[in-house]
């Protein structure tokens, strides 16, 4: 599959150098609207640095970031969030002592009581329920995160991303600790998000999963894209049939 003609996101010639080290060397990448792009490469290939550039955490040394036709030399964290870029990290960032709704809107809770700034829990749960319904999860806004399985927590991270009106979700090894059935469910959720027009960058070392769901695959090696993206078939087989790569 060729790169999209009118992509949501384009990276053009992105480079990042540190003293004595070139982490990224002229990387170009495009992500279409409602497209899943697999990003693969060995450890140290530059995947994490590239994602930090997208998240506004790292400023590139050269290159252009284009989002919806607008050019940026670099993004701030606020720019990334405003543009609809959200992350689902391998290390989950959840609070076990809070319920689902509180985790989704932590720091952004609806308040009442004027200067008392009391959290409106009823309104909080009301705002979270449609997001849970969208993903078809089997837990409620008032469910304690301590009672969730690892797979449910991964889904909760996606709910958090959607609460930010995410248009591009970057998933960094989201299935690394999941069972086969949990992985299949998560990849099914990714398909649903794609159908809704949400773009996804899926980072994984498990090539069978990348083959299963990615529209295109981009390989990073030593901070570069060494060749044209490969083109696996979109989700059409079971993970079990594909097996581990």
Image: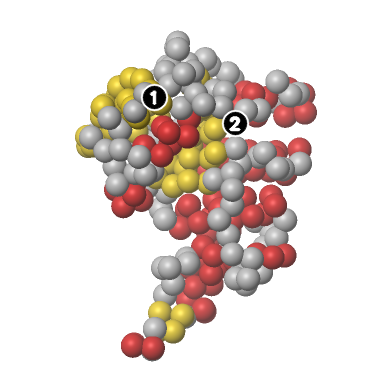
Q: Pointer 2: residues within 10 angstroms few (<14), some, or many (20+)? A: many
Q: Quick one: SS at disc 1?
A: strand
Query: Who comes first in sequence, dot 2 or dot 1?
Result: 1
Residue at image position (70%, 42%) is 177
Secondary structure state at the residue bearing disc 2? loop
64 relative to 7 in the view: left or right = left
Query: In the drawing, does residue 179 fall left or right of residue 50?
Result: right
In the displayed structure, 102 sits above or below 192; it is: below
Residue 59 in the image: above or below residue 98: above
Badge number at residue 4: none
Could you tell me how many numbered marks the image carries?
Answer: 2
Residue indicated by mark 2: 204
Q: For mark 1, does the 10 Å Cα neighbourhood hold few (<14), some (14 to 19), or many (20 or more) residues?
A: few
Q: Tell me the quarter of the picture where residue 19 sits.
A: top left
Residue 143 shows in the view: no
- Which x, y percent locates residue 49? 43, 33
Q: Determine the residue positioned at 70% across, 52% down.
A: 150
Q: Is residue 215 above or below residue 145?
A: above
| Residue closer to the observer: 119 or 43 | 43
- Residue tagged 1: 21
Label pair 2/1, CB-CB below 8 angstroms: no
Residue drawn at x 54%, y 23% is 41
Residue at horizontal 70%, vertical 20%?
245
Up/down of 77 relative to 99, above or below: above
Separation of marks 2 and 1 at Cα, in angstroms? 24 Å
């Amino acid at each position: 599959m060729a790169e999209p003609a009118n992509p949501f996101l384009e990276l053009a010639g992105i480079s990042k150098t540190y003293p004595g080290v070139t982490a990224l060397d002229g990387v170009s990448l495009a992500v279409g609207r409602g497209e899943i792009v697999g990003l693969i490469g060995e450890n140290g290939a530059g995947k994490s640095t590239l994602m930090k550039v997208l998240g506004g955490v790292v400023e590139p040394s050269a290159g252009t970031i284009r989002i919806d036709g607008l050019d940026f030399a670099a993004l701030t964290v606020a720019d990334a969030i405003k543009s609809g870029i959200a992350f689902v990290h391998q290390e989950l960032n959840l609070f076990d002592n809070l319920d689902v709704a509180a985790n989704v809107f932590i720091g952004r809770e609806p308040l009442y009581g004027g200067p008392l700034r009391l959290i409106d829990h009823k309104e909080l749960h009301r705002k979270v329920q449609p997001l849970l319904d969208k993903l078809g999860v089997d837990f409620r806004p008032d469910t304690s995160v301590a009672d969730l399985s690892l797979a449910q927590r991964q889904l909760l991270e996606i709910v958090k991303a959607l609460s930010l009106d995410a248009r591009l979700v970057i998933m960094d090894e989201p299935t690394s600790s999941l069972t086969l059935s949990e992985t299949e469910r998560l990849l099914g959720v990714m398909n649903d998000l794609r159908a809704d027009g949400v773009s996804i960058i899926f980072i994984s070392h498990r090539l069978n999963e990348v083959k299963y769901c990615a529209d295109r695959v981009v390989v990073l090696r030593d901070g570069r894209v060494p060749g044209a993206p490969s083109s696996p078939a979109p989700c059409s087989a079971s993970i079990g049939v594909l097996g581990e790569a």
